[in-house]
Image: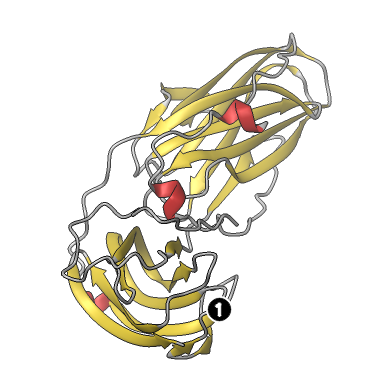
Amino acid sequence: MGVGFLRRSRIVRRKPHTRTNMNRPLLALVLLSAFFFISCGVDTTTEVLPTPILPTPEPTVAVARATAVPAAQTVGICGPGTLPAYIKEVVLARDTQGVNFTPVDVTDEFEPTQRAFHAIVTLENAPADIQMGSRWYLVQATGYTPNTKIDDNVLNVPEGGSRNVAFNLSATQSTWPPGDYCVEIYAEGNLALSKNFKVVGSAARSNATPDVLKQIVLAEDSDPGTFAPINATSKFKSTAPFIHAAVEIFEAPANTVLRARWYPPSQDPLDFELTTDGSRWLDFRLTPAPEGFPTGEYTIEIYVNDQLADTKTFIVE
């Protein structure tokens, strides 16, 4: 998982708090969400059940503030591939129709509320018993680790011939983060081609109130599967690898914005936010500078749709 280390320049571009910057070592702020995806291959005669994957690696402030990220091809993903003669074309669409998966609304731009991305591969005179595959990536989105694989799938096409094969990527959350994505299409284990696409725009914020916040628990660690707190405490060592603020929400409606604002001693505040929903734990965490956490009293505030919901204080010694 990517973790950003703050250097000596400010990374949060917000109106400064009344506290002053005393040139203390800055801290990096990371938000680990329970955001993850499930995808499946869809073909009435070659159906393959989806395999759930682990949550997407945690986002980092260093990534979130970046305005330029290397193209996917420079890190070995989503390259051009070698197209077999029997693949006529590959398109992305908002939906498919009929048993031959005819593309509906072909596009390379999707709304955040799109329930599934569809990659339709058109075969022409394909041999029997070929193996097709797809691999989906989140290339870049604010607050998420770039070039992260979301899921992949493999299916057999016993009939061959001329037909469409459709791969779908469906979200379990209400919205996709705006950003750049791509899907790699494989034939017989080899990369055939890649298709880049975007999620654009933003969904309207919910009308959630601070009541959706159940609790904040400061802890030394968090469960990697549920993000629930481990070893709750209000005192941390300056040499601690992280400081976790586990935030539990309950029945948050779609597009609820949770924001954490940390106040380290003698330093401007650090902010990070996530759009989420449902009932779950979220893990906001601080990462130390190379020389460790500054000692003293800290405060964290949690906001729900810009309304202050709760505040916690803790000590680093």
Residue identifier under label 1: 240
- Measured along the vertical axis of the image, is residue 230 above or below residue 33? below
Q: How is the image coloured?
A: secondary structure
Nearer to me, 241 or 71: 241
Q: Residue furthest front?
A: 23
Answer with left or right where residue 78 lies relative to residue 115: right
For residue 148, what is the image quadrant? top right
Residue at the location (77% across, 20% down)? Answer: 160
Residue at the location (28% across, 37% down)? Answer: 201
- Measured along the vertical axis of the image, is residue 257 above or below residue 196? below
Residue at the location (45% across, 50% down)? Answer: 62
For residue 68, what is the image quadrant? top left
- What amino acid type is highlighted by mark number 1? Ala
For residue 147, what is the image quadrant? top right
Q: Position of residue 143 (x, y in %)?
A: 42, 51
Q: Position of residue 55 (x, y in %)?
A: 57, 59
Q: Residues within 10 Å of mark 1 (few under 14, many from 20)?
A: some
Label 1 sits on a secondary structure element that is: loop
Nearer to me, 270 or 93: 270
- Measured along the vertical axis of the image, is residue 277 above or below residue 299? above
Q: Position of residue 235 (x, y in %)?
A: 45, 90
Q: Position of residue 213 (x, y in %)?
A: 30, 78
Q: Is residue 243 visible?
A: yes
